[in-house]
Amino acid sequence: MTTEIVKGRWYPITAPALDGEDDDAYTNRLTGADQTSRRPYDHGRNRQCSINWHEECSDRGHEGQCGCPCHVERRDAERLVAEWNAAVPTGTVVSFVEGATEPPVATLSEAYVETEGRFVGWPVVDLDTFPHPVWLSWLVKP
């Protein structure tokens, strides 16, 4: 049961619904459409990023119209990949961000910028037991 949301800690994890909140009320709170000042973000976000549909955000050029951290991650993907690869050798066991439910897991590749599929442009790495690459923002370096 969730009764309170701490502002500013909701990336890459999405803020949970509040107790008794239906889907419409949840979406309206995340986007600010409920006009109650209960948005869980400490920055402005476009609608799609507010509801965790980052790939569909209208700020496709990552120019700052949306304040979601995903845009910095995609704009700086090459630099983030290079930093990751310099610090984390393939085979390293990595952990997920606080609040994620996945156990630590070994990397199967160097990080790279995805070039196909749903995550084009994201800095990702292949992990053991995962059928798809994982965004670097989900992972904590050892």
Image (cartoon, rainbow, N blue to C red):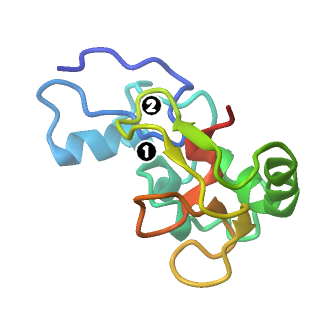
Q: Quadrant of the C terminus?
A: top right
Question: Which residue extends farthest bottom?
Answer: 116
The residue at 45%/39% (across/down) is: 13
Disc 1 from disc 2: Cα separation? 7 Å
Q: Taking the image as drawn, is residue 36 in sight?
A: yes
Taking 66 as reference, is 11 above or below it? above
Depth order, front residue of 49/90: 90
Q: Taking the image as drawn, is residue 44 in sight?
A: no
* Picture disc at residue 66: none
Q: Is residue 123 left or right of residue 17?
A: right
The residue at 56%/25% (across/down) is: 8
Q: Secondary structure at mark 1?
A: helix
Question: Which residue extends farthest front?
Answer: 91
Q: Quadrant of the N terminus?
A: top left
Q: Position of residue 52 (x, y in %)?
A: 44, 53
Q: Please state which amino acid type lies under the numbered disc 2.
A: Arg
Q: Secondary structure at mark 2?
A: loop
Residue neighbourhood size for the residue with mark 2, other residues' Cα within 10 Å, grouped as few (<14), some (14–19), many (≥20): many
Q: Is residue 109 left or right of residue 37?
A: right
* Picture disc at residue 39: 2
Residue neighbourhood size for the residue with mark 1, other residues' Cα within 10 Å, grouped as few (<14), some (14–19), many (≥20): many
Q: Quadrant of residue 140?
A: top right
Q: Position of residue 44 (x, y in %)?
A: 62, 40
Taking 14 as reference, is 75 above or below it? below
| Residue that label 1 marks | 31
Q: Position of residue 78 (x, y in %)?
A: 85, 63
Q: Please state which amino acid type lies under the numbered disc 1.
A: Thr
**Circles 1 and 2 in contact, beta carbons < 8 Å:** yes
Depth order, front residue of 33/92: 92
